[in-house]
């Protein structure tokens, strides 16, 4: 339904899709979501399928970064992005730790979709101008899925938020270098961030450059009130910003961090 809805909003049908990017880290089926969609939509036989099953919370930002590269190489290419996370599959009765309780309170099942093209269209929402990627070595055990006899378990270490903060600091440095010729006046008008929880959002507010306006993370915080959507979260935040109304030319930064720890950010402009 999400895929068909995105195509309808974009004024396209399934026959117009040239590439499909999917992510579904909580449901490691083989064949995967890409094959299911190729058959159910259905897509043309020559569509390039790019499934990603381990992006998790960065699926929104990283899929957009990949799609932007694909349409930069071929502006006429149409890329459909679909992310589905069945996070409730990680709820196991045997998990009775505080961390497991937090996960059950936070996680939400969601499917989202978006269309990325290389040429402006009347339905276009956001232009993507630059992408940034960052991975912290030695942090692969802080958040992970474990498969046991009774099913899949999400394991979360309390040290995780502090490690995620390091990727936030690195992102500030990237933006500073990108706009070092205009450091005093440049700032985003919307900051759409999915760092895994509100604790890191608070850190972002405390450490963002001086002079940036308040309220940049309001849409990000609002998204958490109805659950952590994993890889689908950034698209939910993006939709909230869109529905609230943004002005053409508004500067946007999208950011997400995921188990690994790895992060991806995008900088663009509202159309």
Image: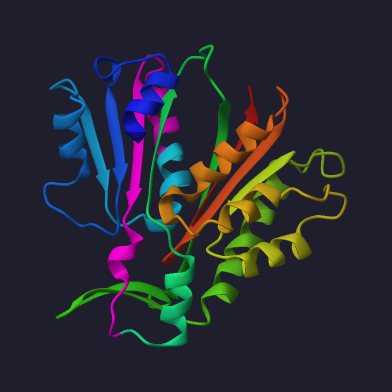
Q: Is residue 168 above or below residue 20?
A: below
Give the magenta-colored segment's residue range: 66-94
Tell me, yes or no, if residue 266 can be seen here.
Answer: no
Q: Residue at x 38, y 27 (%)?
A: 5
Total numbered labels = 0
Q: Which quadrant of the figure has residue 113?
A: top left
User: Where is the C terminus found, in terms of image quarters?
Assistant: top right
Q: Residue at x 16, y 54 (%)?
A: 29
Q: Residue at x 65, y 29 (%)?
A: 269
Q: Is residue 137 above or below residue 271?
A: below
Whether residue 91 is in magenta: the answer is: yes
Tell me, yes or no, if residue 224 can be seen here.
Answer: yes
Residue 192 percent location from the top left of the image: 62, 46
Query: 182 or 258, which lies in front?
Result: 258
Q: Is residue 136 above or below residue 94?
A: above
Residue 24 percent location from the top left of the image: 29, 51
Whether residue 113 is in magenta: the answer is: no
Left or right: 7 with respect to 184? left
Q: Which quadrant of the figure has residue 90?
A: bottom left
């Amino acid at each position: 339904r999400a895929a068909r809805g995105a195509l309808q909003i974009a004024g396209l049908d399934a026959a117009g899709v040239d590439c499909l990017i999917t992510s579904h880290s909580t449901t490691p089926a083989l064949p995967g979501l890409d094959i299911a969609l190729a058959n159910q939509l259905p897509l043309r036989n020559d569509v390039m399928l790019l499934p990603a099953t381990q992006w998790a919370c960065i699926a929104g930002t990283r899929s957009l970064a990949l799609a932007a590269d694909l349409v930069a190489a071929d502006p006429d290419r149409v890329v459909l992005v679909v992310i589905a996370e069945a996070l409730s599959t990680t709820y196991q009765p045997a998990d009775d730790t505080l961390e497991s309780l937090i996960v059950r309170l936070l996680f939400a099942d969601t499917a989202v979709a978006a269309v990325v093209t290389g040429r402006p269209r009347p339905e276009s929402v956001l232009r993507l101008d630059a992408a940034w990627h960052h991975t912290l070595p030695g942090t692969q055990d802080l958040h992970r899925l474990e498969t046991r006899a009774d099913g899949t378990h999400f394991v979360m270490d309390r040290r995780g938020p502090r490690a995620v903060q390091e990727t936030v600091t690195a992102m500030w440095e990237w933006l500073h270098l990108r706009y070092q010729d205009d450091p005093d006046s440049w700032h985003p008008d919307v900051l759409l961030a999915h760092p895994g929880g509100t604790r890191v959002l608070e850190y972002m507010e405390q450490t963002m450059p001086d002079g940036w306006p308040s309220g940049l993370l309001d849409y990000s915080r609002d998204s958490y009130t109805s659950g952590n959507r994993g890889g689908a979260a950034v698209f939910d935040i993006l939709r909230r910003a869109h529905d609230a109304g943004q002005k053409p030319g508004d500067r946007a930064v999208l950011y997400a961090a995921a188990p690994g720890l790895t992060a991806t950010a995008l900088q663009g402009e509202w159309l």
